[in-house]
Structures are given as C-alpha cells and as structure tokens.
Amino acid sequence: MNARHIGERILAVEDITLSFGGVQALAGVSFDVREHEIRAIIGPNGAGKSSMLNVINGVYQPQRGAVTFLGEKRRHMEPHRTAKQGIARTFQNLALFKGMTALDNIMTGRNLKMKSSLLAQAIRLGPAEREELRHREYVERIIDFLEIQAYRKTPVGRLPYGLQKRVDLGRALAMEPRLLLLDEPMAGMNVEERRDMCRFILDVNDEFGTTIVLIEHDMGVVMDLSDRVVVLDYGKKIGDGTPDEVRNNQAVIDAYLGVQH
Amino acid sequence: MIYRENGQFKTSYRADQQIFPILQDRAFMLGLSALALVAVPFGASDYMFRAILIPALILSLGAIGLNLLVGYCGQISLGAGGIMAVGAYAAYNFFIRVPQLNFLVVLILAGLCAAFVGMLFGIPSLRIKGLYLAVATLAAQFFTDWLFSRAGWFTNYTPSGSVSTPTLTMFGWAIDTPTEKYLLLLGLVFVFALCAKNLVRGHVGRAWMATRDMDVAAEVIGIRPMYAKLTAFGVSSFYLGVAGALWGFVYLGSWEPLAFNINLSFSLLFMIIIGGLGSILGNFLGTAFIVILPLLLNRIPASIGVHLSTATVSHLESMIFGGLIIFFLIVEPHGLARLWSIGKEKLRLWPFPH
Amino acid sequence: MKFLATQWPVAALAVLLALGLAAPLAIGDAPVGFYIEVLLGGLMAGVLYSLVALGFVLIYKASGVFNFAQGAMVLFAALSMARMTEVMPFLVALLLATGIMVLLAFAIEKAVLRPLVNQDGAVLLMATIGISYFLDGFGQTLWGSDIYNIDLGISKEPILILDGVFQGGILVSQEDIIAAVTAAVLVGALAVFFQRTPVGRALRAVADDHQAAQSIGIPLNRIWVIVWSVAGFVALVAGMVWGSKLGVQFSLSLVALKALPVVILGGLTSVPGAVIGGLIIGVGEKTAEVFLGQWLAKTYALAGGGIENWFAYVLALLFLLVRPEGLFGERHIDRV
C-alpha cells in the first residue's frame, strides 16, 4: 500500500477474558499489533470490540490475561497512566467535554505535557503564558490538519456530529500518541465525511508514524486502510490476518451471515 | 452598533487569548474601575459600605472559591461555611499568637490552613460523587461547627465561645473606617479574581472542566482525577479561607461559631447558582443579588405602607430564594452571567433585530 | 472466601459497632440499666429517622431524584396537621392533611420535575434544595412559626419495665413504642405495595430507566405524582410521630437532615436499608453522645455534648468510602 516501514511488535494482548456480572464480553482473546501499522478490529455488534479497546487503555480490568505495551506487561493500568505511556483513543459515543469550545477540548489533550505550577498559572505572565502559547501553536497545527479552523471557538455541543468527531480525533492527536485507538471513527457519517476521515487517518499514520488500531463496520474502509485485521465474534477471536485472508475465512463469513456455529 | 468587533483582528495567539479581547469590554472595565476607585469612596454613604459593599466584596471572594469547585470542577459542596470558619479561626489564632505578622501574611496562612482542611475533606470525592459527596461535605460542615464551639483552644478559651478581633493595622496604618476597609477589600478581590481567571484559563482549569464534563474521558486523556479534584478542593478552600478570615476580621469584628453555619454554606451555593456556575463574572452578579435582595425586602413593604414582622420577612426571603433557585435552574441554568452575555449579544446587533 | 472479600465492609461495620456498643460497658462505669435505656432511646430515635428516610428512598427509587426537601415536607405536613387539629376532629384533619400533601405533589411535579426532566442529578438536587427553602418559608407563612402540638392521644407517662432484673428498672416511653409499631406497619405496607401491586411494579420500572418505562406506555408524570404523594403521606406520618414527641417547630426540618446519612448507610434504593440504617445511626449516635462525649470531656477537656450533630455524617462518610452503594443498595456499572 504505502512505502511504510512496519516495525516490531508494539502491543500484545494475551488471553484477555472479561465479564460483567453474568455477561462475558471477551473470552481468551490474543493478538498483537506492530509499530506503524493500521490494525482493524471487526465483528458483528456485541462482539466485544469496544471492550477490547477499553481493556487496552485501562478503562476495564480483565479477569484474566495481560496487555504488553512497549515491553511493559500488566493486567490493569490506570487510564491516565496508559495515556502517559502514549496510548490515545477516540470514543464511539464521542465523550467530548460539552462545556468547552473545540479549541479547549483539543487543548486538554496537551494537559499531560503542560507542567507549569498552580502559582505560575495564577500569575500567568511569564513562564505560564509562554507555555500556553507554545502548546496553542501545536494545537493550531492539528486544527489546520483537520480543517476545523472556523469552529475553534464554538462550544462543541453546538457542532454537527461530523465535526464533533474531528474534534474527538484532534484531542487524541494532541497527545502525540504512539498508539491511537479509534472506536468507529466513521459511524454516522455520510460519504464525503467518511472520505475525509479516511484521509485524516492515513495522513496521521503516514506523517506521524502513529500505530493505529481501529474498530470499523464499513468493510470497504477496512479492506482499503488496514494492514492486518482481527475478527471478533461473541467475545472470541475467529480470524486474524491480512484483509484478503480474513475476507476468505469461512468462520468470518458465517459470523456475518449469522450462520449457527 | 456600539458593541461591534469590526476591525478588531487578532494577529497573535497572545492577543487572541486576552481576558478582554474586545475593545469595548476593556473600555467598560476601565470605566468600572474608575467608578469603583474614585467615585464610590467619595460618593457612597456609610450605610452603603457597611451593608452592601463590604459584605458583597467578601462574599464574592467566597463565591469565586466555591464556584471553582462546584461550577468549574463539578464537585458539589455544602460545607463552604465550615471552610470559611477554618480560615477565620486560623487567622484569629495567628493574629493573637504571632502578633508581629503582617495582616496579609496572616490572610495567606489562613488560606493555606483552609486549603489543607479542604483537601482533607475532599478526599472522599475521589471515590464518590453527586449527592453522596454532598453528604460528605455536610459531615465536614457539622464537624467544624462542633469543633470550633467545643475545643477551647481555637477561641483561646473564652468562656462564651465567641471571639473578638482588635482593630486591623497594616504597615502602620489603622484600617477602621468603612472607606479604608472597602479599598483594602477592593484591592484584594481584584488580585484574587484575576488569579482565579488565570487559573481557569490555564491547563488546571481545563483539567477541572474536563473532570466535570466527563471524568472517564478526562482520565483517558491523562488528566489524573486525584490531581484535578484535590487541586479544585485546595484552591477553592484557599479562597474560602481567606474570605472567612476577612468576614471575621473586616466585616463582623467579633463572631461565634454559629456565624459560619450551614446557612452560610447555602447562601454561597445560591449565589453561585443564581450568578452562574462556571463563570467568574457570575459570582459578583449572584452575590450582589443575594446581598441586596433582603435589604429590598426590608425596605419595600415599609415604603408602600405594608408592615411585615421580621419573621415574616425572613420567611418571604426563604420562599423567594427557593423559588428563584428553581426558576434559574429551569430557565437559565447558567445564571445571571448567561443573561449578561445574551444581553451583550443583543447589543452587538442593536438597533437591528437580527 | 469470596463472600468475605466482597462483604468485608459490612463485616467491618458490624465489628466496629459491636466494639462501640460493648466499650461503654467494659471501660465505662455506667450501670447496665442506664446503658440499656440509652440503647433503647437510640433505637427509638432510629425509628424516627427511618420514617423520614423512607420518604427519601421512595422518591429516589421511583424518580431518581434525591429529595433534599423531604425534611421540609415533614415540617409542612406536621404544621398543617397541628394547626388543623386545633379547629377540627383528628380524622378530618388527617384526611385534609393527606389531601394537602397530594396537592403539593402535583405542584412539585408540574412546576419543578417536568421542566427539569432530562437534567442530571446535581441539578435536580439543587432544585430540591430550592423546594426545601420555599416550603420552609411557605409553611411558616401559612401556618405560623410558633411551636405547636400534635395530640395523638398517647400518654406521656413512661412505663417501667424489668425492674426486677436491672437496678432501678428501665423506663420506656409509650410514644416510642407506638412510633416503632407505626414504622413497622408502614414499612410492611410499602413493601407489599412495591412488590405486589401493578403500580408498585411500574414504579420500579420507572426507577430503573425513565425512557424505557415511557416507551412501554407507563405515564411518567402520573407515576411521579403518585410517588411524591406517597412520600408526602410518609412525611405526614413521620411529622405526626415526631411532632407529638418533640413539638412541631422549625428545627424539625433540620433534624430531618439527619436522615441523609441514614439513607447513605442503608442504600438509596432500599426500604429495609432505610430502616436498618436508621436504627444503626440512632443507636450509634446516642451511645456516642452519652459515652464518647463523657470520655472526650474527661480525657481532652472538650466541653461535652454536640457529638450527635456530626456522628451520623462521619459514620456514613466512612462507610461510603468503602461501600458507596450502602448496605443494601445496588451497584451501578457505567459503560463507556
């Protein structure tokens, strides 16, 4: 596809088992992700895809299994620590900060990198203001990249859905992540918006070398964008490989057609 | 027509990020400052100082503090009165036990004590929210009520339990006339309000608002909930502590523990709800409202010939406050501050309808 | 073993309470008869708290609203009852008072709940704070702010029991016994109401998920009026029982604030929790006031008394930290 150098293994999940009360969301799922690649997770609704992302960035704690990221193995890590390690994500249901403008939402993505003390911020003049301006410049580059300049001062609650999704992506990008988890980034978008979002995702992977794991239902997008695909069904992994391999996998076809198995 | 931004282009991020980016706003603030600094000290009566300006300035400082916690960080607190009490008693104890200290230093120390206690009582917020947190803050309120009325050490073992402060002196100057008190408070409130606005514009303010809006997403971005919540409790309590010390020293002069009871907590809550949660300007509007309304209720019936007993007046006050809270929550949850900015929006277009 | 792992806060609470209850007997020098009187007094206070807490639980269970104004409702109901019994027979007054509380429920639903229907908990909580201030002022404007009496026809003479077993015997007030019986009957009736009647089921559905309940045709507004009316009636009962004991006065609504920790301890959605929480808080509070207060006064020269004001809150707070859903409440799982 692109002349990209796909690197070594950056993330590995082993034997992840997760249940809520009586409902089992994931059962013994294992796969890995290599640096700089675009890995898609697909499967019918309720297969456990979002739960998988939540386990990777620490929102859920699996009953069994481990996640290894950048060589560090753990069963559970607090979400803010995974963020510090370099994992960022977008959400299926957006989860934007409704009380703030688009600009401020993306600026929150820089919070990890902003270090000025309370007192410095209270005074503002001097080091705190310089830091704020420096990060503002970086965020403005992201705003340019996502083409949302006109909306930066609008409260996000008032933006149309497609633009809100871009702000969500911008917020994740502001963290300068090594691994970006995208949860159905194109859900609810029309054809043009999808094309734009595809372009953004490819550009992010190309320019910044960010490794991307994405959940997506649109098969065309999945086949075009991804290097490798994982298929989940009822919490189990039923397919793992390149888009072509997965497309021809009988178990995958059965799962989508709803054949009893 | 007057309030147009035409021609005011910003060519740097710094200019874009100012507190008052619009020229007309800056002019308005300048005019207001002139009024406050020059016209008021000469023109206002003693009554205006004692009954309105002085309490309103101190309470707006407290309101700013509470608003940082409740409005910006979304942590509900019904214990603001207790925190103010901590500030007042801390200031009293520093003042009489270490008399050499400058009053400003005493204020800062009182604020720090209150911040420490506030953070302590804020620890539950790491595990609980909403009404459970409200109950936890009530625990703080009732506990401090009890502590300051029973533990004699805080009141220097006065038999009655109440405390009296000597005249304030600063840099050799006695501050005992209403005008002097007003100017001191004006200066303090200005500095503190500016600092609050700066904090809210900075990354800690964004951390607070993110925690308020969606704490799970905030954590995923890397904002540590403990950092956001405890700093909110800490800074908020600092402001409340300073306000408490000022309330005791500058306004009351002498007080008993009941002066900081749950009614004060509710009054502050009403101020920030009516004024506007999550707004610095709102604190001033809400405080002015809450301070002036009882005075009006006392004056108006008498002036139109209807005589009401003080008990009736206070019942009416309760009804009006309760009703107004509900009204604002339904009609304009962002309070008077939102009404103010809507007014400015209309002013942009005036005299055209759209 | 797993049972112990999840239930350890409850076990810890039980151990703590047992120790706290045993301590005055072991370390202190109080006679056993006196100790049992304090205990019984605590239980009775606990029953009163439970009556108020029941109202909280009802409203929370069915509308997800935490009704800060429950105490004000108790006061309002008690005031209406007290003033009306001055001019009319008891039963007529009772009927009218119930009618007034139903009207109040209508008013609250129309003026406050309906406009705020989609707001989150904090907003509704503050709205109920507004209602409580309004009701306090309104009640006293309407009915007056002196101290009034409710005569339930119960003798104020305490009964002396067990004077053969314990030195001096134990004094038990008849009013307290009636209160306990009333509470038991009320709890039983409410339990039946929730579990066996269609309205009760509808209430539970609404408590779980407003939108889902609406979508199967449950009329939300009518349900809320019913719930607030029932809670209003419970408030009336609480007001009468409490008012006849303490006299009907403004401080009633403040005392009712104490029911908050009861509900926290018992679990916001549990009727038995309200009862058990009330009893625990009542007993804990009284023994702490009497015995802990004495000990603190002796050891630290702290002027005695007043512990009652914060003990309940601190106990609830500590329990909250380890078990936020309370003794019998339900755990919420938030999906992201």
Image: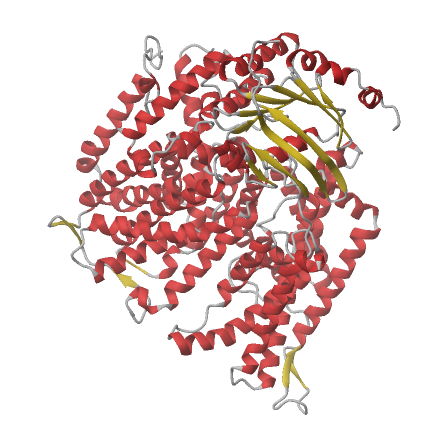
Residue in the foreground of this view, choosing between B85 and B264: B85
Q: Tell me if B282 is positioned left or right of A47 in this view.
A: left
Name the residue at 56% across, 86% down: C31
Residue in the foreground of this view, choosing between A135 and B138: A135
Residue in the foreground of this view, choosing between C238 and B214: B214
Instruction: Work out whether A142 lies above or below C321.
Output: above
Instruction: Work out whether B308 lies above or below B284.
Output: below
Residue C313 spot, x, y in % from top left:
53, 59
Outermost left residue: B172
Name the residue at 49% across, 62% down: C310
Q: How many marks?
A: 0
Outermost front residue: A8
Q: Quadrant of the N terminus of chain B?
A: top left
Residue A83 spot, x, y in % from top left:
51, 32
In the picture, residue B61 is in which quadrant?
Answer: top left
Residue in the foreground of this view, choosing between B38 and B306: B38
* Residue A125 visible in image: no
Instruction: Work out whether B39 lies above or below B76.
Output: above
Q: Tell me if C299 is positioned left or right of A192 in this view.
A: left
Name the residue at 57% across, 13% down: A202
Name the residue at 55% across, 17% down: A166
Outermost right residue: A260
* Residue A232 visible in image: yes
Instruction: Work out whether A15 lies above or below A232.
Output: below
Residue A136 spot, x, y in % from top left:
39, 21
Q: Tell me if C227 is positioned left or right of C150 in this view.
A: right
Colour scheme of the picture: secondary structure
Residue A108 spot, x, y in % from top left:
46, 28
